[in-house]
Image (cartoon, helix red, strand yellow):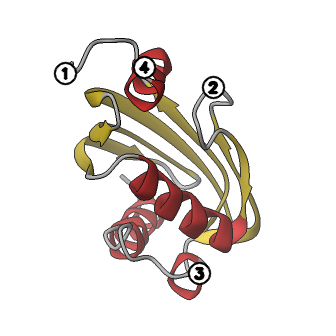
Amino acid sequence: MTDKAQLLLDKYYRVMGKWQTLTAAEASELVADDCIIHEAKSLPFGGPWKGPQGIVDLMTTVQRTFHPFEFEMRKMSASDDVIAFLGQISGEGGNGRFSIPIVEFWIFRDGKAVEIYPMWHDTKLVMDVYRGDGRKDR
């Protein structure tokens, strides 16, 4: 791994380690003003979110939608302008609980994220927990 990639990872961990209480000022260290976070449109909070305030609002919305919401990092890789990782997310909704893998792909320009692609492994399951399908635990 290059020094530049390591610096990017260090910044990611420093900023996103606070994801539950992240502020826009903190997020702006890592996320560019023109960054777009591309959430799957099928999720209750799906669609684009923009900039440092967008990632803060997204984290708040996810935690409010699925409470408690938990994230565990499993594997991470970085180059000079990309971070990719595999994690495990879980949450509770009005109709049960889910626990699924998530993969995220972050693209950087000048040390700040300009595009983020979170890929929830099973959006149908997540929506079943959100809306209900009769099953309570997965």
Q: Earlier in the sequence, mark 1 or mark 2?
A: 2
Q: Which residue is mark 3?
A: 24
Residue 58 location, x and y as percent?
Answer: 56, 58
State the mark number for residue 128: 4
Q: Left of 121 or right of it: where is 106?
A: right
Tell me the CA gap for discs 2 and 3. Answer: 26 Å
State the residue in front, 91 or 81.
91
Q: Left of 84 or right of it: where is 48?
A: right
Q: Secondary structure at mark 1?
A: loop
Q: Earlier in the sequence, mark 3 or mark 4?
A: 3
The type of residue carrying mark 2 is Ser
Q: Earlier in the sequence, mark 1 or mark 3?
A: 3
| Mark 2: few/some/many CA within 10 Å (<14, 14-19, 20+) | few
Q: Secondary structure at mark 2?
A: loop
Q: Which residue is mark 2?
A: 42
State the residue in front, 84 or 7.
84
Of labels 4 and 2, the one closer to you: 4
